[in-house]
Image (tube, rainbow, N blue to C red):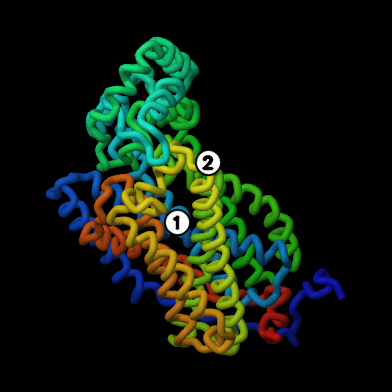
Amino acid sequence: MTEQDTTQTPDASTPVTSAIKMRSGKLCIPAIGAMGALVPALIFAAVGNNGLTRFMFAYIISYAFFLSISLGALFFICIQHVSRAAWSVTSRRIAEVLAMTMPVLAIAFLPIAGNVMLGGGDVYPWAASHEHHAPAYGDDHAQPAHGSTTDDHAASDNSENNHAPLSASDAYAPDEKKVADAHQAVADHSDHSTTKAKSSLHAPAVSLEGHGHIPGVIDAHTEAIYTAKKAAYLNVPFFIIRWIIFFAVWIGLSFAFWKKSVQQDTTGDVQLTRQMERLAPLGICLFAVTVTYAAFDMIMSMSPAWFSTIFGVYYFTGGMLSIFATLIVVLTVLRNKGLIDKTTVSKEHMHDHGKFLFGFVVFWAYIAFSQYMLIWYASLPETTFWFVARGATTVAKDMNSWSIVSIGLMICHFFIPFIGLMSRHIKRTNQTLVFWAVWLLVFHWIDLWWLIMPEMSVEVRIGIVEICCLIGLGGLFTAAAVWVGSLNALVPQKDPRIAESLAFKNL
């Protein structure tokens, strides 16, 4: 029998799950109240040493966290329809609800878009002129990189990377002029190689404060030329246009799947399932492209000189890890509250969610190691500086306060949960499965904090600003999810595979 044979129109003999709806008031009001936490976050950031820059970094960390959950939910829906999966039917509606938070997240993106449009060079250097952010790093070159001599490094700098700063008028214009000017600067300064080599030992180190600038690895001039070469992509108008396209795709897909799913609750039309199955492959393709570039834009472009083609996959992996953890927590709460019957989403279904959670723990470690190993092995200054800024280095002298976080992620985001989730018994025991789901959500947020915060400071910073942003955006995300969830039944009522899902058993 093929999968096609299982999609039959439900009849009187087909089990139909309880059409319980969630009461939004009891949860929406506290969730909306939690949004007020953004106010003290803004106040504490404003009176701090870094002003509103600290707030923006903290805001982006938590925004990336909740966006990853919503995106993970969208991909989960697409995969279930592509594979024509039956086991997930009874828990798919919760993923549809979480994906439908996307319109609210689009509104929550406005502070980030506003920061870019106002020339927020403290967060995104490419959004401001060279004069705006270069003084923070200094105009002199850094100390030579480890593993090379002073003369060799200086000569290499002058022949490849040591460019004069570009002017404010054209440093980040999206055309070819700045690149030609930078190469001309190389020719103009080529006669001074020997002088530079002799003086580089006495040049002051580039500041560690901001955008991954580490002594001896990359300097402000090098960043300027690499940023200039990417200016056709990294410029304010194109950034805004891209994000309009991203949200149009994400909202369109989320709404299409949710609308057809809830419509089927009333009509029981099997053709709606067919339509969702045909839409899902296109959705996966659009998802892959948009999420990759969104990860580049939102996080990777904070350090515009850095290169990594695998970064989009890294962010996607965190999103999939977070959605399975979130589904485990939410489904457990709903089951315990009696809003979803424990026979509708049974131990068997929770076991499968646990298996996927375990799988993405391993996949996250694989992607993280692959990215680090390739950059470490190549040992190119234009890529290694990003990991050195985070203390993820094999050179003892380059370690900093972020090194502890790097080691902690390796242990707590992989080794500990890998061992903890390996047992079948753990995944079939509700309390232990929820514990590991919450554990991984915490370390997913820490992972994003580790990705983003070193761009502001080499010192490890976490405090009331970051916590309040997490609570505030969490309140917004929760309120949106609760409101959408209250509109319809929490479990699909007439999906053609509902009977198969209710009878699902693990081998």
Corner quadrant of residue 5:
bottom right
Q: Which amino acid does label 1 sit on?
A: Leu
Q: Is residue 90 above or below residue 430?
A: above
Q: Specify few, some or many for label 2: CA neighbours under 10 Å numbering under 14, 14-19, or 20 or more.
A: few
Point out the tag, 1 or 2, that comes first from the N-terminus. Answer: 1
Foreground pick, 418 / 439: 418
Q: What element carries label 1?
A: helix
Q: In which quarter of the image is residue 221?
A: top left
Q: Which residue position is annotated with label 1?
A: 67
Who is closer to the viewer here, 420 or 489? Answer: 420
Judge left or right: residue 46 versus residue 386. Answer: left
Whole-percent x, y for residue 337 in the image: 43, 86
Front tag of 1 and 2: 1
| Mark number displayed over residue 245 | 2
Q: Could one spot residue 222 in this view of the protein?
A: yes
Q: Hey, what amino acid is under mark 2?
A: Ile
Q: Is 395 above or below relative to 330?
A: above
Residue located at (52% from left, 57% from top): 369
Residue drawn at x 34%, y 76% as measured from the top left: 26
Instruction: Count all numbered tags in the image, as a single digit.
Output: 2
Q: Which residue is drawn at 67% across and 77% down?
A: 87
Residue 320 spot, x, y in % from top left? 54, 63
Secondary-structure class at tag 2 = helix
Report the quarter where the C terminus lies. Answer: bottom right
Q: Can residue 247 be seen in this view?
A: no
Taking depth in this image into account, of 89 and 218 the one nearest to the observer is 218
Relative horizontal placement of residue 298, taking residue 88 as reference (left or right) = left
Q: Quadrant of the N terminus?
A: bottom right
Percent across and percent down for residue 414 are 48, 69
x then y, percent, for residue 137: 26, 33
Residue under the point 29% across and 64% down: 471
